[in-house]
Image: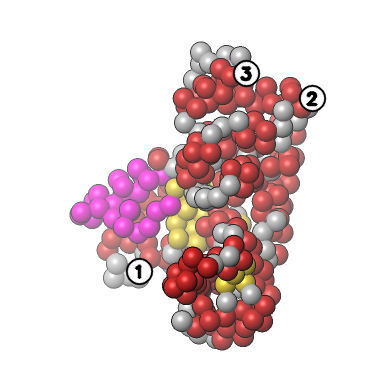
C-alpha cells in the first residue's frame, strides 16, 4: 500500500479538513484532494493534520494498534505503509525540497534552500554513524517584494527542518510588531520572551520585521530590540527565526544594532517573477481551479502583466491570484445570463472580456 493509497482510504471530508489545517484549502474531486495533500508536506505532517479519531478509525481498519497517543498512531501507520510497500526508507518522493524545486521561478532561492537541505541530510547521516553534529545558527533573512513566495518558502523550510528532526514541531508561527508590544514599556520584554517560548521547535516568521524598531524615537522598539537579540542568541538550536521584508528597509533594520546582522546565517533574496513565469503561475492556478484561458485571453495576458509590472508596489504572484479571482467573478457574471445553455467548456473558459469587465 503506497502512502497515496493510504490517504485515499479517508473520506473526502476528512481530507478537506486536513488540507484546511495544512493551509492548503482546496475543493474538487477526491483524487485531486489526495494528490494535493500528499504533495503539501511530509507524510508525518500530512497524517498529523487528520483528526485523532480519524487516525484511530484507519488503524482499526487495518488491525493496527490504537491504544497509544496520536504520535504513535502516525508512526504505526507510516510503518504499516512502508511494510506494505516493502521499503524501509522515508518517502523521498514527498520530500519538502521536491515541493520547492517544482515551484515556478525562485532560482536563487532554490540554490540556497537546496544547500540547507543537503547540510541537514548530511548531519542526519553523521548522527546515525555516531559522528559529532556541527551546530550552526539557522536564523534567516528573506528579502524581496510582495508575492515573491517568502511565506510559502518559509513553510517549506519548516517542513525540511522537521523532516530531518532538527525542529520538533515544524510549525510556522507568524508574528508582527503588535505581538511584541505591551500596554506599557516594561511589558514588551516579557511579551518578546513569551513569543520565543511559544516558537520553540518551530519557525518564528516575522514579515516586515523592520516595523519592530522604527527609529531612535521609537521607545517601544528600543525596549523590544535588546530582548529580541537576547532571545535570538538563546534559541539558536531549538528554533529557526526568519525575518522578511523589502530589501532596503531590511538592510536599514539590520544596521540599526551592531549585533543584529551577525545573528543571521542565511540571507536569501527573492527576485521578482518575470512575465513568462507569471503566465506559468496563471496557467497552474487556473488549472487547479478547473478553469482555462481562451486563446484570446492568453495572448492578451503578456501585455496586461507587463503593464502591471510598471506600477508601484506590483505584487507578483499575489497580483496573478487577484487577477484570477477577478476573472472568475466576471466570468460568472457573463455566463449566468444564459446559464441553461452553457456547456462544460463555457463554464470553465475564461475570455479576454472577463479581464476587461
Q: Is residue 287 visible?
A: yes
Q: CA distance from mark 1 to mark 2?
A: 57 Å
Which residue bears the numbered disc 2? 86
User: Where does the image place residue 54, in percent across and percent down from the top left?
Assistant: 50, 27
Q: CA distance from mark 3 to mark 2?
A: 17 Å
Q: How is the image coloured?
A: secondary structure
User: Where does the image place residue 12, in percent across and percent down from the top left?
Assistant: 53, 38
In this picture, which residue range is highlighted in magenta?
174-196
- Is residue 299 shown above or below 13? below
Point 57% across, 80% down: residue? 352
Cβ atoms under marks 1 and 2 closer than 8 Å: no
Q: Exactly how many numbered labels are in the figure?
A: 3
Q: Is residue 268 visible?
A: no
Q: Secondary structure at mark 3?
A: loop
Residue 189 within the magenta-colored segment of the rendering: yes
Residue 2 circle label: none
Which of the pair 88/243 is nearer the observer? 88
User: Where does the image place residue 217, in percent across and percent down from the top left?
Assistant: 29, 70
Which residue bears the numbered disc 1? 214
Which of the pair 340/20 is nearer the observer? 340
| Outermost residue to the front | 341
- Is residue 75 shown above or below 201? above
Point 28% across, 60% down: residue? 220
**Local crowd size for mark 3, using a 10 Å CA cut-off: few (<14), some (14–19), many (≥20):** few
Tell which tag, 3 or 2, sits nearer the viewer.
Answer: 3
Point 74% across, 22% down: residue? 83
Side (left or right) of 297 relative to 311:
right
Q: Secondary structure at mark 1?
A: loop
- Is residue 284 shown above or below 31? below
Amino acid at each position: 500500500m503506497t502512502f497515496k493509497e493510504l490517504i485515499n482510504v479517508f473520506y473526502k471530508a476528512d481530507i478537506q479538513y486536513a488540507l484546511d489545517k495544512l493551509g492548503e484549502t482546496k475543493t474538487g474531486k477526491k483524487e485531486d484532494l489526495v494528490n494535493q495533500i500528499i504533495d503539501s508536506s511530509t507524510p508525518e505532517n500530512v497524517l498529523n493534520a487528520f483528526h485523532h479519531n480519524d487516525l484511530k478509525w484507519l488503524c482499526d481498519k487495518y488491525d493496527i494498534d490504537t491504544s497509544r497517543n496520536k504520535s504513535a498512531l502516525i508512526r504505526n501507520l507510516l510503518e504499516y505503509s512502508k511494510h506494505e510497500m516493502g521499503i524501509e526508507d522515508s518517502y523521498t518522493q514527498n520530500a519538502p525540497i521536491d515541493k520547492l524545486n517544482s515551484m515556478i521561478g525562485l532560482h536563487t532561492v532554490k540554490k540556497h534552500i537546496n544547500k540547507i537541505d543537503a547540510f541537514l541530510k548530511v548531519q542526519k547521516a553523521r548522527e546515525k554513524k555516531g559522528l559529532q553534529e556541527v551546530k550552526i545558527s539557522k536564523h534567516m533573512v528573506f528579502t524581496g517584494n510582495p508575492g515573491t513566495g517568502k511565506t510559502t518558502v518559509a513553510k517549506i523550510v519548516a517542513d525540511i527542518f522537521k523532516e530531518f528532526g532538527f525542529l520538533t514541531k515544524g510549525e510556522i508561527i507568524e508574528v508582527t510588531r503588535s505581538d511584541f508590544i505591551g500596554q506599557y514599556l516594561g511589558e514588551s520584554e516579557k511579551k518578546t520572551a513569551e513569543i520565543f517560548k511559544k516558537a520553540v521547535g518551530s519557525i518564528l516568521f516575522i514579515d516586515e520585521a523592520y516595523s519592530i524598531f522604527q527609529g531612535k524615537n521609537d521607545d517601544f522598539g528600543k525596549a523590544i530590540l535588546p530582548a529580541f537579540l537576547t532571545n535570538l542568541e538563546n534559541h539558536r538550536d531549538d528554533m529557526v527565526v526568519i525575518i522578511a521584508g523589502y530589501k532596503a528597509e531590511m538592510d536599514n533594520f539590520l544596521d540599526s544594532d551592531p549585533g543584529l546582522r551577525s545573528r543571521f546565517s542565511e540571507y536569501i533574496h527573492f527576485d521578482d517573477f518575470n512575465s513568462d513565469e507569471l503566465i506559468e503561475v496563471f496557467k497552474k492556478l487556473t488549472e487547479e481551479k478547473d478553469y482555462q484561458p481562451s486563446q484570446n485571453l492568453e495572448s492578451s495576458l503578456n501585455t496586461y502583466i507587463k503593464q502591471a509590472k510598471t506600477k508601484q508596489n506590483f505584487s507578483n504572484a499575489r497580483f496573478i491570484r487577484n487577477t484570477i479571482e477577478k476573472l472568475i467573478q466576471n466570468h460568472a457574471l457573463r455566463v449566468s445570463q444564459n446559464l441553461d445553455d452553457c456547456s462544460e467548456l463555457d463554464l470553465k473558459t475564461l475570455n479576454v472580456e472577463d479581464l476587461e469587465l
